[in-house]
Image: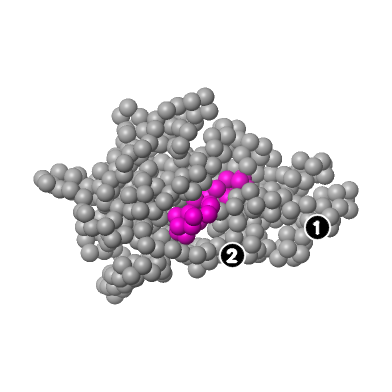
Amino acid sequence: MSSLSCQWLCGAYVYPSGRFFNLSSSNTSNSSLAGFTIYCSNSQFTPGSSKNDLKFVLHDALDASGVNTTHARIAREGFCSQVRKLSNIERETSICINRGVDLGKTALHIAAEDDSLVSHSSVPLPVDDFLERLDHLSMGYCSRYSSSFTSSPEHFIHCLEKYLYVNKGFRRTGATNQSEPRALYLHSVLTHRSGSASLLSLLYSEILKMLRLWGFLSFDIEVFFPHDSSSTPRGYCKQKTKESDQSHVMTTQSLLEEMLKDLKDAFWPFQLDHTKSPFLRAARAANCSESTNDSDESAFELASVKAALHRLERGVWTSVRFGDMRRALSACERLIILQTDPKELRDYGALLYHCGFYKEALQYLTVYQDGQKESLGLIDNVEEEEALEKLKIRLNLILMEEGWSPPTDNKSFLRNNSEPW
């Protein structure tokens, strides 16, 4: 590897034990994605088929480093149990009329897994307690604005947004980096009243869902999801929908994808040059992509990597401009489970390369590339395709090297770090 492709998971070169299951059941989700199938078992989702035996590595890698992942695995199973309910119709259903997937519970399972990964707490995140807090938010509106139930849709929307953004003080935070990771997790948003657009949309839709369930809502309301960096989600009467509003309507699938991509982008370990995709930034760190920056920026990147490694070796986890590999991996794995974009396979493979999981990285990259060839799709980014090919060549050379074996160094940021929210 190049000097820039630092060993982010120094102790994670030991391959995982492979306790994955390809057992299907009556509620198994079998949806084709990029040439392979996602199988759901009682323990977790596992990409795999007779041709492609792919495995998620994060939890087993943490276990091998001495980190107890019991709570993380339970939270992941909770997430998977909700994703199993995503039928094709449900995926395209607006969050305001969603019936099958409990978006609040799903978001809290995401938070519970990441909390376990970074805090190493012996106590799991109290998901049920935060679900109660979510219900209390809806009940609070009923007690304060009960008269709005018999008013016009416009007045109801005005009261609801006054309650949410004024009385309760929820506000939008532009958390495109790690300066405020609390804005990306539902339990923190409920506590600190500051959140991303996706989580504020979730809160808005959950209140509407509960009011409709209790029989207080007799008209259809849609949530307008803002695509800028400062606006808050707003409601509007569905009967007055304009064609331009369609791109701002969030479905169950698109909201979950938005939440997970927010986490992936925030904790992606290669934060320089946001004009490039996460994959290209990872490929550049491996010297598999041409750099457009000057030598001063490259020198700064190298110095930052060395400084980060020094902090990690001392057990101090700070992630200024260099993300969090644990949470980036968990976000990628959940995006693969969600089955929305085959490129998630490629991005996950790039992270595995930097973690030293060369065999698994090559498998994911190959499955992604084979799927692209089978779909006969046009290459939409030549630079990404060239970087992918270079990365695959490097991985093949590493694996072909006679006598190659994973390093035995046990130092790892996976083991000795704790990070409070």
Residue denoted by label 2: 173
Dot 1 lies on which element?
Answer: helix
- Count of numbered badges drawn on the protein: 2
Residue denoted by label 1: 159
Q: At which x and y percent is residue 298?
A: 28, 70
Give the residues drawn in magenta, as a range.
Answer: 103-124
Q: On the image, which quarter does residue 238 sit in? A: top right
Point out the tag, 1 or 2, that comes first from the N-terminus: 1
Q: On the image, which quarter does residue 218 sit in? A: top right
User: Identity of the amino acid at label 2?
Assistant: Thr
Q: Residue at x 77, y 61 (%)?
A: 162
Q: Residue furthest left?
A: 402
What is the C-alpha distance between the residues marked 1 and 2?
22 Å
Q: At which x and y percent is residue 378?
A: 37, 40
Q: Is residue 326 above or below residue 97?
A: below
Dot 2 lies on which element?
Answer: loop
Which quadrant of the rendered structure holds the N terminus? bottom left
Asked if residue 377 can be seen in this view, the reply is yes
Q: At which x and y percent is residue 276?
A: 38, 59
Q: Residue furthest bottom?
A: 296
225 vs 81, left or right, is right
Q: Is residue 364 above or below residue 125?
A: above
